[in-house]
Image (cartoon, rainbow, N blue to C red):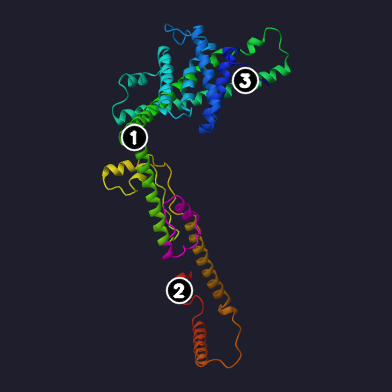
Amino acid sequence: MGELNMEDMPLPALFEQARKIHLGATDSGDGVDQEEIRKGCRALEKCDEMISNLGLFSANETKEDISTTNLKYLLVPYYLGELIEKVARNDRISILKASQAKLKEFISICETMELVPKEELEASAKDGPNSHVDRRALKIARFKRQRAAESKLLEIKERKERRGRSTKASALSTPIEAGEEDVLDDDGEEEREAWFTTISLAVSKAFDLLEMLKKEEEMLVAFKERQSKDGGKEFYQDVLDDRAKRAEAWHRDAATRVLYSRPAEPITCATFAQDVLEGRARVSEMHEHKHQPLIFGPASLIGGNPTSERERMAAQVFQPSHRLPTMSIEEAGLKEMEIMNTWQERNVKLMEEANSAWYKEPMKPGPPPEGEDEDDDAAQDRARAWDDWKDDNPRGAGNKKLTPCG
C-alpha cells in the first residue's frame, strides 16, 4: 500500500500515523530506527502547524470548552518532545533544548486548560522543590498519579472491549434498525474520560522527562566547559591512557596470580553459584552451604551491619513484609538427609532387638547351666509352702465379722 504524502493527509490521519510512530519508539526504547523517528517528528510538526492554522485551541478556553474530538491534539507537543529527545545527533545539547522547549509548551497549554496538578504548579513556581524531603514527596505523588492513570486507562479499555463483545453478540441475535447505530456507538463520555486520563499521564511523564533532560544538559555543559579548558584531544587521550594502564595492570596481576593459585573446586550448590555470578562471593572461598539472607533497601548500602540508631532505622525501610527463609534449599536437603539417616539407623537397631528377643531365641540343647538346679529347688520349696498354707487357711477363714452369725 502506497504511502500518502503528509501535505495531502488530513489532520486525524496524520495524527494517528504520528501517534503510532511515537508508540513504537516508546515501546522499543533505543532500538528504533532513526529514520522512523525523524519521520514521526516531521508528522508531528505538520500536525502542530495545522492545529495552529485551524485555531483549535484558545487561551480563553478551559478543558470543558474543548470538544472530545480535539482533546487528543493537546498531546502533539508532548509526543514531539519525546521523539526529539530520541534523535541521535552529535550536538546533543541542541537536541535537549529543543525537547525541553516542546515539553514546556505542552505543560503551558495544560496549565492554561487547568490540567496540571496544584503541587506541580507550586513546585514550578518555586523553580523546583528545595529540600530532599519535598523532592521525594513530589516524586511519590507523581508516581501515584501515573499508576492511577494507567489503571484507569486499562479499566476503560477492558470496559470498552466488554461492551463491544456484548454489542456484537446482540447485533448477531437482533438486527440493527436504521437510526440505532449512533445509540450503540454513543461512548463520547467514556472517550472524553480516556483522553483526559491520557493527558494527565502525559503531564506526569513530561515533568519527569523535563527534570531528566535538565540534569543531562547541565552535565554536558559542565563536561564541555572542562573539555574546552583542558583541551579536547589531550583530555580524551589522558582518559584513554589511564584506562589502558589500569587494564594492563589488572591483566598482569591476574597472570601472576594464576601461576601460584590452585584450580577452584567445582561448584555444586546453585545458591553459591548465583552468589559468585552476582559478586557476593568468590570462587576461592570455602562453601559450607550456609544461607545468606537477602538484604533489601538501605540495609544493602550499609552492609547489613548498622552501627547507630539512625542506620538501624534506615535499614528497616523497604524491607519485605513476609518472613525471609532461614536456610537455603541445599541446607534444608542436607538437614533432611541427616534426619533420614538417623531414623534409618534407629529402625535398624530396633529391628535387631526385635529379632533377638528371648521368646524367639531357639532352646539350646545340653545340660542346664550351673546354679539353675538350685533356683528350681528353691522355687519348688516356695510353691509347696504356699500350698500348705492354703490348706491350713481355707478361703474366708478369719473374717468372722462378715458372717451373719459371727
- Mark 2, residue position: 400
Q: CA distance from mark 3 to mark 1?
A: 61 Å
Would residue 14 be found to the left or right of residue 80 on screen? right
Q: Nearer the viewer, mark 2 or mark 3?
A: 3
Would residue 140 be found to the left or right of residue 126 on screen? right
Q: Nearer the viewer, residue 307 or 358?
A: 307
| Residues shaded magenta | 257-284
The x and y percentages for residue 54 are 51, 7
Residue 72 visible: no
Q: Residues within 10 Å of mark 1 (few under 14, many from 20)?
A: some
Q: Nearer the viewer, mark 2 or mark 1?
A: 1
Q: Nearer the viewer, residue 181 or 134?
A: 134
Say which element carries label 3: helix
Which callout, 3 or 1, points at the residue further toward the start of the chain?
A: 3
Amino acid type, residue under disc 1 in the picture: Gln
Q: Residues within 10 Å of mark 2 (few under 14, many from 20)?
A: few
Say which mark, if any, is on residue 227.
Answer: 1
Q: CA distance from mark 2 to mark 3?
A: 105 Å
Magenta-span inclusion, residue 404: no
Say which element carries label 2: helix
- Mark 3, residue position: 163
